[in-house]
Amino acid sequence: MTEGNNRKNGRIAREKTKREEKGFLILTVITGLVLFGLCLAAALFLDYTKTPDETMRIRIPRFIYEHGYLPNGDEPELLEGIVFGFSYGFSPYLPSLIGVVFMEIASLFHAGEYGLLVAARFANVLSGVGVFIVCIRLGRHLFDKKAKAYLFACLCAFLPQLIFLAGYLNNDSPSVFATALVTLCWVSGMERQWDRTSCVK
């Protein structure tokens, strides 16, 4: 009788855990979609003349999109009206290169200038959402309760500064995402005693 009760209690506990995991996953997906909406709204409505140095950064994906190759950095169209005395064309950073891919996709739908600008910003939008996803996983490693992991991820990803950074072309939003990813791999590596998979990550 006791063995039967133990099996029944074990089954009930597993089902409860499964329901909790499913509920947590649904909550995480909904929160991620809300964050995506906020970051996309920032990308749609931020005036690029009001964002720090985006007027210079946007020239790089625009140049690659129009010409089909990386700039040398000293092209007249990249140097005209420069603000800081140098051109970002000498070092086309990863967000600019990813932005070109989204610009090419947007051009398939005959996007105008505004559509291409939003497309170039899309890598940053995804980086903002990526911070939340990675911080959820990191929180599961750091905290004993799912609620704490969720709160930790929300505090990291819903900062107004991060949503602002996720709304225009820059290196900072992908850098925050990369930092969160490195931290997750580091914590995971310590837990798994740096097995082969941890080292590859």
Image (tube, rainbow, N blue to C red):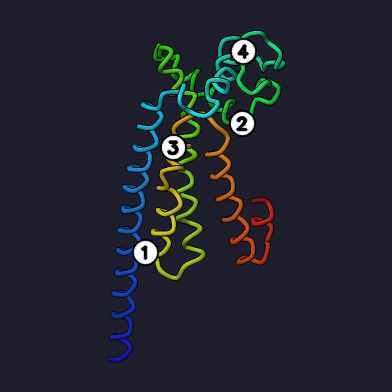
Mark 2 Cα shell of 10 Å, populated few (<14), some (14-19), many (≥20):
few
| In this view, 177 is above or below 107 | below
Residue tagged by mark 2? 94
Residue tagged by mark 1? 147
Disc assigned to residue 164: 3
Q: Earlier in the sequence, mark 4 or mark 3?
A: 4
Measured Cα–Cα span from mark 3 to mark 2: 19 Å
Q: Earlier in the sequence, mark 1 or mark 4?
A: 4
Which label sits in the foreground, 3 or 2?
3
| Image quarter of the N terminus | bottom left
Q: Is residue 101 left or right of residue 155?
A: right
Circles 1, 2 touching at the beta carbon (< 8 Å): no
**Residue shown at the point (49%, 24%) measured from the top left:** 120
Circles 2, 4 touching at the beta carbon (< 8 Å): no
Q: Is residue 116 left or right of residue 70?
A: left
Measured Cα–Cα span from mark 1 to mark 3: 26 Å
Quadrant of the rendered image containing residue 56: top right
